[in-house]
Image: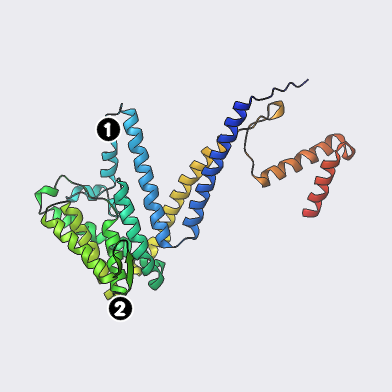
């Protein structure tokens, strides 16, 4: 004889709250997957940057917790592993840093500023030239900025013990490319009003030059200028018929697909952990698992067929017969 026990109201409330949190997490992850899969190149680049930012900061939190709140010291090693450093040896032993550095951010404001600039100016480039040119400008401007940083770093002693990361050089290439494409278009700035793109891009370049004069983040600002120069050169060469995007078409078909698979893997890990948190008691000690609607349908159908095999059709209840009838029509 089976015995049942009614759950207390507090436990039921706790389970409902947990189910709501799981549903909200699943909804958020599905939204991200939809945006990444069907959004434009700008959307994909922003999602990748944000995902890396979240991952780095989770690592910082874990390092801090497990070090007894003595600081996220281990994160610096992780950052250097994916960042540029002056000197040839680091780049030879870490060749991926030429790409990975332009997707790394630690500070929220650093990330927010770069992503807003990428969104505002990148949409202009994407609308006028298409997604493949956005990706080409972003990656090649980031590479150009990184090379300028490495060259300058070999001559400036203050940069010898530094490392560089962030999307700023890549974003500056996109900003200047948009301003070169349509210099007299307006962008509405908060508290200022409409300003032509050429003036916004010029002001950003001047700020980088002035910052070099004050020796604040010198290597970073040199990298920004390198990215900006490449963004300008890209559009000028495109007008002459030289399409640099062809240089990264194969990278788009291969490396970007790998990035997409990596992101999907991370999302699937979160989804699996969320699904595994939803448990239900099954009579007679059945294994606990979550089923999709299709899996639940198949399981119910198999159960009815097994019942017919063992006890005959007449042993089915009215609901089971109706389910079997509908299933036959569906087949």
**Quadrant that contains the C terminus:** bottom right
Please provide percent x and percent y for residue 228.
24, 65
Front of the two marks 2 and 1: 1
Query: Which class describes the residues within 10 Å of circle 1: few (<14), some (14-19), or many (20+)?
Result: some
Local SS, label 1: loop
Give coordinates of residue 195: x percent, y percent.
29, 69
- How would you rate the neighbour count of disc 2 (Cα within 10 Å): few for under 14, some for 14-19, many for 20 or more? few
- Say which residue label 1 marks: 71
Query: In the displayed structure, would residue 209 be above or below residue 324?
Result: below
* Left or right, 4 with reference to 163: right
Whole-percent x and y of residue 115?
Answer: 35, 56
> Of 38 and 96, which appears nearest the observer?
38
Q: Is residue 331 visible?
A: no
- Evaluate whether residue 208 shows in this view: yes
Could you tell which of marks 2 and 1 lies nearer the N-terminus? 1
* Scheme of colours in the image: rainbow
Q: Which residue is mark 2?
A: 239
321 sits to left or right of 284: right
Give the residue drawn at x 32%, y 33%.
63
The one nearer the camera, 117 or 79, is 117
Residue most extreme to the bottom: 240
Q: How many marks?
A: 2
Q: Secondary structure at mark 2?
A: helix
Residue drawn 69% across the image and 24% down it: 6
Q: Is residue 52 left or right of residue 301?
A: left
Classify 34 as above or below 197.
Answer: above
Q: CA distance from mark 2 to mark 1?
A: 51 Å
Measured from the top left, where is residue 139 in percent x and y? 32, 61
Residue lying farthest to the right in this orientation? 314
Q: Nearer the viewer, residue 195 or 55?
A: 195
């Amino acid at each position: 004889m089976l015995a049942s026990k009614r759950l207390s109201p507090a436990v039921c409330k706790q389970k409902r709250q947990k189910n709501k949190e799981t549903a909200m997490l699943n909804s958020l992850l599905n939204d991200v997957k939809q945006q990444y899969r069907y959004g434009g190149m700008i959307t994909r680049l922003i999602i990748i940057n944000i995902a890396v930012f979240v991952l780095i900061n989770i690592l910082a939190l874990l390092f801090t917790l497990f070090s007894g709140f003595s600081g996220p010291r281990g994160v610096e090693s992780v950052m250097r592993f994916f960042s540029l450093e002056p000197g040839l040896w680091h780049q030879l032993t870490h060749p991926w840093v030429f790409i990975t550095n332009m997707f790394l951010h630690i500070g929220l404001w650093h990330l927010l500023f770069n992503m807003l600039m990428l969104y505002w100016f990148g949409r202009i480039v994407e609308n006028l030239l298409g997604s493949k040119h956005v990706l080409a400008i972003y990656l090649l401007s980031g590479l150009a900025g990184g090379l300028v940083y490495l060259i300058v770093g070999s001559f400036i002693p203050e940069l010898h013990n530094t490392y560089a990361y962030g999307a700023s050089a890549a974003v500056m290439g996109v900003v200047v490319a948009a301003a070169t494409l349509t210099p007299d278009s307006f962008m509405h700035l908060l508290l200022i009003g409409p300003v032509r793109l050429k003036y916004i891009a010029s002001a950003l370049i001047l700020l980088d030059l002035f910052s070099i004069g004050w020796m604040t983040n010198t290597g970073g600002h040199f990298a920004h200028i390198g990215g900006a120069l490449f963004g300008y050169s890209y559009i000028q060469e495109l007008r002459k018929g030289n399409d640099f995007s062809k240089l990264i078409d194969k990278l788009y078909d291969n490396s970007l697909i790998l990035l997409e698979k990596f992101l999907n893997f991370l999302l699937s890990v979160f989804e699996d952990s969320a699904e595994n948190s939803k448990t239900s008691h099954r009579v007679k000690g059945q294994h606990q698992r979550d089923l999709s609607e299709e899996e639940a349908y198949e399981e119910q159908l198999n159960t009815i067929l097994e019942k017919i095999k063992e006890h005959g059709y007449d042993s089915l209840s009215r609901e089971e017969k109706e389910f079997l009838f509908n299933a036959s029509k569906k087949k």
